[in-house]
């Protein structure tokens, strides 16, 4: 533990080095502005922005590139609340619960109050969960260091099952998509014996399928294809008059303090569970605030506390989702899958050894994540009037440009035409899967974790020296416990996630 705290101090020295600090701040500000811009546009998600801009990270040092993506993450989740409040059109799924009270406040001439309440609640929730993440990551990293190949393989397998169970689609569909992801991960050379497999005679596939075009195609290009189906028009009636109104006052913010802290705790707790995410956190935080209120009848009719509850909860998810990714290499949701790809791209492979081998760099990034919240508050407060007008941009202009950036970014990384075919293929695969209500997250997670599971199994077979059953049962009993508990944990989490989603759907139907 002492070494990890030393690494934390070294990380602070890296971040606050005069030669790097200013550039890190500028990259984070750029990420925040891009995230807020994309989040404020209904139809373009934070995930899409992060996937398309991921190639930029390949050309930057970790202390610049990763905080840039984290800035997009934070700015995008908040940016979704802007159209949700002004025109009842959530820019991201995480902002759906914000539409319960935001538009009503705008109609009352309190749009500016609602936007500022969303900003302050987002910053408080995000900042608190980030601090929690830094202190939580040390003991979990110590546990991860004691895990050997058998236990790591069992944990990774458990995580895949849990992600399939708690995804947005049906459990069986999630398992099917996971199997597809494992198959795709096996294309190329065997990581142990270096033998080619499933290449079907295509020379370009011998090195395997590249992570970057797969992620961008699966998440960003498929999202764009789905959006192209919708009628290309302005997001907002151009005749709509701005009714921002007065600014938020300190007594109004202070009156929502208890609600913000409650939602922060809810969001932080949900963020630790893989596959649940911001949408569920926002609904649960909103429901908890309404149940605890002395005037629940005001909710849905223009209650500032409702905006605060939803926005604090969905932003508090951001930090804790990084804990399993950094310590075990397990991405908890789609966005952390993009971040994992970014870490791999800059030579920082998340897993049990990361905190030992590159601890100072990791803590520098985590401290930058906390600092980003201060920048988030300043940038967000000054730019609210600007992004309140962004909702007027027609997607008939945005979609072609976004697709162009996606293909250009993928090609720029390796100058390999094969990557463009991979991008297009996975864009179509993702589009078809999402069209038939399959969750694409298990495919991406299986693709990322598949080689690690295979490597762990191979190392376990080598260590067992021919007696796999006896070795695992008597020398590594924790592995057996994890494997036995896997279906029990998956089933309980699946039941819990289904209950939360049903509650969210009920609240959404009541609003409509």
Image: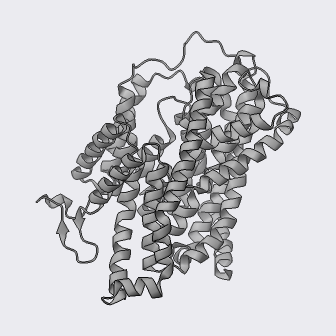
Q: Residue furthest right?
A: 251
Q: Residue 257's x, y, as percent?
A: 82, 42
**Considering only vertical position in the picture, is 236 above or below 34?**
above
Q: Confirm whether residue 348 shows in the render.
A: no
Q: Please tell me how many numbered marks the rendered image carries.
A: 0
Considering the image in quadrants, where does the N terminus appear? bottom right
Which residue is pictured at 61% across the width and 12% down the height?
Answer: 240
The answer to whether residue 272 is left or right of residue 175 is: right
In the picture as drawn, the residue positioned furthest to the bottom comes out as: 465
Pick the residue in front: 378 or 363. Answer: 363
Image quarter (top left, top right, bottom left or bottom right) of the C terminus: top right
Residue 111 percent across, percent down from the top left? 71, 23
Check the image and report above or below for 201 versus 42. below
Above or below — where is 63 with respect to 462?
above
Image quadrant assignment for residue 178: bottom left
Q: Residue at x 14, y 61 (%)?
A: 203
Judge from the rendering whether residue 413 lies leftward or rightward of residue 19; answer left or right: left
For this view, does 118 lie left or right of residue 154? right
Residue furthest to the left in view is 201
Residue at left 26%, top 51%? 419
Of residues 399 and 29, the one nearer the viewer is 399
How are the colours assigned in the image? one colour
Q: Is residue 389 visible?
A: yes
In x, y percent, where is residue 483?
45, 70
Relative image position of residue 159 (x, y in whole percent): 47, 61
- Please tell me which residue is depicted at 55% across the width and 24% down the height of the picture: 391
Quarter assignment of residue 100: top right
């Amino acid at each position: 533990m002492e070494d990890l705290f030393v690494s934390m101090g070294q990380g602070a020295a890296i971040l606050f080095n005069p030669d790097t600090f200013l550039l890190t701040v500028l990259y984070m500000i750029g990420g925040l502005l891009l995230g807020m811009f994309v989040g404020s546009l209904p139809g373009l998600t934070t995930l899409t922005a992060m996937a398309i801009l991921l190639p930029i990270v390949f050309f930057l040092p970790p202390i610049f590139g990763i905080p840039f993506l984290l800035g997009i993450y934070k700015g995008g989740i908040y940016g979704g609340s802007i159209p949700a409040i002004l025109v009842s059109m959530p820019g991201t799924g995480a902002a759906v619960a914000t539409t319960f009270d935001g538009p009503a406040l705008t109609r009352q001439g309190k749009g500016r109050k609602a936007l500022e309440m969303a900003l302050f609640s987002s910053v408080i929730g995000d900042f608190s969960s980030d601090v929690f993440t830094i202190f939580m990551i040390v003991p979990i990293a110590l546990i991860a260091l004691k895990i050997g190949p058998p236990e790591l393989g069992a944990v990774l397998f458990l995580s895949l099952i849990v992600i399939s169970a708690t995804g947005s689609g049906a459990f069986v569909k999630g398992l099917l998509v996971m199997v597809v992801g494992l198959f795709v991960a096996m294309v190329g050379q065997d990581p142990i014996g270096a033998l080619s497999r499933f290449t079907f005679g295509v020379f370009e596939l011998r090195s395997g399928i590249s992570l970057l075009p797969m992620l961008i195609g699966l998440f960003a290009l498929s999202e764009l294809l789905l959006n192209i189906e919708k009628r290309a028009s302005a997001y907002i009636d151009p005749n709509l008059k701005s009714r921002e109104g007065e600014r938020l006052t300190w007594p109004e913010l202070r009156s929502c303090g208890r609600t913000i802290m409650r939602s922060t705790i809810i969001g932080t707790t949900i963020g630790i569970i893989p596959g649940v995410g911001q949408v569920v956190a926002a609904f649960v935080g909103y429901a908890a605030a309404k149940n605890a209120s002395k005037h629940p009848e005001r909710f849905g009719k223009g209650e500032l506390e409702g905006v605060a509850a939803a926005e604090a909860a969905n932003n508090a998810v951001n930090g804790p989702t990084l804990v399993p990714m950094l310590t075990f290499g397990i991405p908890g949701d789609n966005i952390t899958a993009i971040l994992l790809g970014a870490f791999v791209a800059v030579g920082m492979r998340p897993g049990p050894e990361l905190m030992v081998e590159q601890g100072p760099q990791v803590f520098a990034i985590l401290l930058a994540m906390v600092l980003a919240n201060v920048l988030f508050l300043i940038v967000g407060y000054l730019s609210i009037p600007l992004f309140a007008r962004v909702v007027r941009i027609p997607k008939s202009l945005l979609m072609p440009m976004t697709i162009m950036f996606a293909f250009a970014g993928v090609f720029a990384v390796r100058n390999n035409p094969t990557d463009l075919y991979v991008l297009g293929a996975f864009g179509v695969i993702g589009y078809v899967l999402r069209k038939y209500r399959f969750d694409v997250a298990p495919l991406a997670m299986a693709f990322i974790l598949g080689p690690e599971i295979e490597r762990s199994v191979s190392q376990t077979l080598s260590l067992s020296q021919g007696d796999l059953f006896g070795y695992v049962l008597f020398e590594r009993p924790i592995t057996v416990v994890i494997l036995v508990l896997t279906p029990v944990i998956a089933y309980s989490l699946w039941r819990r996630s289904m209950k939360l989603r049903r509650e969210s759907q009920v609240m959404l139907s009541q609003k409509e």
